Image (cartoon, rainbow, N blue to C red):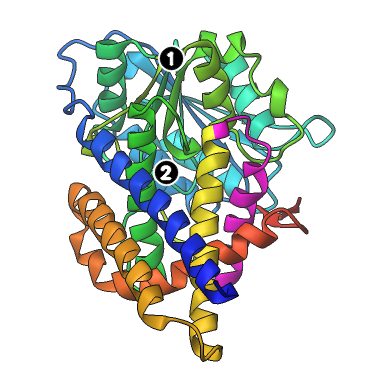
Amino acid sequence: MDVSQAFLIITGLISLIYCIQFLLYLFYWKALSKPIKKSPNPNTKVTVVVPVRNEEKNIEACIKAISNQCYPNQLFELIIVDDCSEDKTVEIALSELANQEHLSSSLIQLNRDEKTGKKAAITKAVESSSGDLILTTDGDCTMGPHWIMSMISCYEYNKPKVIIGTVLIKSEETLFEKLQSIELCGLALVSGASIQQNQPLMANGGNLCYEKKEFYNVHGFRNNKSIPSGDDIFLVLDIHKTNPTGVVFVNNIDAVVFTKPQKSLLEFYHQRKRWASKSAQLPSLHIKWMGIVVFGTNLLLFSGILLALFYNEFDVIVFISIFGFKSIIDFIFLYIATSYFKKEKLMVVFLIGQLINIIHVSLFGMVGFFGKYNWKGRIH
């Protein structure tokens, strides 16, 4: 057995593990409970928390979307926490809040002399909140009018400790934006399926709900305060550790939150580097295992493409068979995901997305743990 044959065997085995895991995710996704009907008489007080930094282009639309919620005004409040913005975020936010007289709201500004960062902003908001539930989103997000009601209906029906929601891209125009959008659809399916499997894999602070008392029970972000990002998944894992059945995924289109795509390759680079940088410090063995499987599969396939181009003795037919089988599983997986979120048209970029995904997963899997990244004007 030569080196190329050994390479193909290893690639085939790792790819098979990958395919089996994602088929399992499809099984768990199908096992998710049906969307819960809206509560006819909700009685849960909720505090919507929006930590912001340099969001002058987005904060007005975010506030308007929150103020238009079909949820009793007396049962929810909005707290915006400004994390030392260097633009006109505060002025625009205050102006828009003044226009929403029916909305119980406040704006808190972090002091540059105290602890700053997204986790500090959320902690400050929780301390000032009056709601039993904390519902977080980001300053660049918008949502439909039934967002809060959908999340609260899920809470009042199941009484979980944490509710994980979906964040998608609202409109996609360029190829770059469509590739980001189809990936977020797939990640949403993985998120819901892994929770159904009772192995939470990811969460997004742009759409996350948890009991205020549970935030304090796990001491907030005390266990990961030195890590700039991860305000979502670290908190979910800490609560899941003490309440293994207390984390649920809200299976409801009305509960989806929308964000904007990254506009440039540099923005995309810093975003994905930030995502990758925290993964090694997550305490979940399942997350580490899936990281190894996904990274390993894509790195081996990327290496296989290079071998097929430059090594004459390489068995291209066997390699194409392995790549093709993995692509079929990915196609089924993403078609189900995009169909659920009514974004089937994104599948037209599937083939090019497969090739680009192999490169970008391999790249960020290698560079995510080294160097620095820019997040909201700060270098970490």
In percent of width and height, residue 337 lies at: 25, 50
The residue identified by callout 2 is: 62
Observer-side mark, 1 or 2, equals: 1
In percent of width and height, residue 20 lies at: 34, 47
Q: Is residue 112 left or right of residue 255?
A: right
- Name the dominant secondary structure of the magenta segment: helix
User: In which quadrant is the N terminus drawn?
Assistant: bottom right
Q: Tell me the quarter of the picture where residue 195 sits.
A: top left
Q: Is residue 158 left or right of residue 30?
A: right
In percent of width and height, residue 283 lies at: 63, 30
What span is colored magenta in the figure?
264-285
In front here: 161 or 138?
161
The residue identified by callout 1 is: 161
In percent of width and height, residue 66 lies at: 36, 35
Q: Amino acid at mark 2?
A: Cys
Residue most toward the right? 113
Q: Secondary structure at mark 1?
A: loop
- Answer whether residue 135 is magenta in the image: no
Residue 349, can we see it?
yes
Q: Amino acid at mark 1?
A: Lys
Q: Secondary structure at mark 2?
A: helix
| Whether label 1 touches label 2, CB < 8 Å | no
Residue at coordinates 30% horizontally, 64% vertically from top-left?
325
Label total for image:
2
The vertical placement of 332 against 133, above or below, is: below
Residue at coordinates 43% horizontally, 14% vertically from top-left?
161
